[in-house]
Image (cartoon, rainbow, N blue to C red):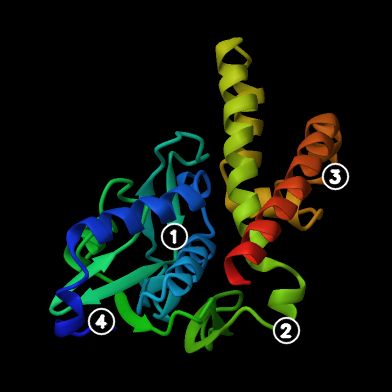
């Protein structure tokens, strides 16, 4: 972290320029709030590292991620209005943190596209007083979970994290997360908005929202090329042409982000 003496040279114009630069690189990924905040945070961290700016990551966990007895999540309003339930459910959130003396600056474009947030401002966006907040090293990409001892199917944060190496690096989880968000946003513009403009039926709009507005469904179909209870073989056959086309877009976006990350880290 920056100490007090270092902070004297780190004036507001520097912060503003840094914030704008990272926003430019991340756009449009951060505008899909359904998921992959850890990918947004990690790309931001790589840019901060490239600029030799000391920083960490601040993580916040909803009760469902640390309590055996709670299913409480962070309920976030969807600015794109494509979430099937009308709101987004988060079990955790993360963003880069720069500390200048006693001042904490959080770079989270999900909540503020124009300026960094204080910790108090950042936590206020989560709309709950129940959470656990920890500050970790910037290399930590995502956390490990362990099975609940009391509830089958429930997993809880176990206190450990992993970095972008091994399987995570080889499988391009960072690049794929960013590509998921960008592709979903493109489909919002080209599929959902177009359908609404053409006065498509409620059933079709509902299908599109479940496909595009749910991070679990979107990643199942486009990243994993798999099926789940909602994204059944029948559903995917019904929308075969659409899915086939945007799978190609997704793969192109993976390559785009791969090249960008290589440029940043070389």
40 vs 94, left or right, is: right
Q: Are marks 1 and 4 in contact (CB under 8 Å)?
A: no
Whether residue 116 can be seen here? no
The earlier-in-sequence mark between 3 and 2 is 2
The earlier-in-sequence mark between 4 and 2 is 4
- Quick one: quadrant of the N terminus? bottom left
Q: Which residue is mark 2?
A: 166
The earlier-in-sequence mark between 1 and 4 is 4
Q: Residue at x 44, y 60 (%)?
A: 90
- Quick one: quadrant of the C terminus? bottom right
Between the residue at mark 3 and the residue at mark 2, the CA separation in whole angstroms equals: 32 Å
Q: Please count the marks in the image.
A: 4
The earlier-in-sequence mark between 1 and 2 is 1
Dot 4: few (<14), some (14–19), or many (≥20) neighbours within 10 Å?
some
Q: Residue at x 18, y 64 (%)?
A: 11
Q: Which residue is mark 4?
A: 2
Tell me the quarter of the picture where residue 206 sits.
top right
Residue closest to the eye, 261 or 61: 261
Between the residue at mark 3 and the residue at mark 4, the CA separation in whole angstroms equals: 53 Å
């Amino acid at each position: 972290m920056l100490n007090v003496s270092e902070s004297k040279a780190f004036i507001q114009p520097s912060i503003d320029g840094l914030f704008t630069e990272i926003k430019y690189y991340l756009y449009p990924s951060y505008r899909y709030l359904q998921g992959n905040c850890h990918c947004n945070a990690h790309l931001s961290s790589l840019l901060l590292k490239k600029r030799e700016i000391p920083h960490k990551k601040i993580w916040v966990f909803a009760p469902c991620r640390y309590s055996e007895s709670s299913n409480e999540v962070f309920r976030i309003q969807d600015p794109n209005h494509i979430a099937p339930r009308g709101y987004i459910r988060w079990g955790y959130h993360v963003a880069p943190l720069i500390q200048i003396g006693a001042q904490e600056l959080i770079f989270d474009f999900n909540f503020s596209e124009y300026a960094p947030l204080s910790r108090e401002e950042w936590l206020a966006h989560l709309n709950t007083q129940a959470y656990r907040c920890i500050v970790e090293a910037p290399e930590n990409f995502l956390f490990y979970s362990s099975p609940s001892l009391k509830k089958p199917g429930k997993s809880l944060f176990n206190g450990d994290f992993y970095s972008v190496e091994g399987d995570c690096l080889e499988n391009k989880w960072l690049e794929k997360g960013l590509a998921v968000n960008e592709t979903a946003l493109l489909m919002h513009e080209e599929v959902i908005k177009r359908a609404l403009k053409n006065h498509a039926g409620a059933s079709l709009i509902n299908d599109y929202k479940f496909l595009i507005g749910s991070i679990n469904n979107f990643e199942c179909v486009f990243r994993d090329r798999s099926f789940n209870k909602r994204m059944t073989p029948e559903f995917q056959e019904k929308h075969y042409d659409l899915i086939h086309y945007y799978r190609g877009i997704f793969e192109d976006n993976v390559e785009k982000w791969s090249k960008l990350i290589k440029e940043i880290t070389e």
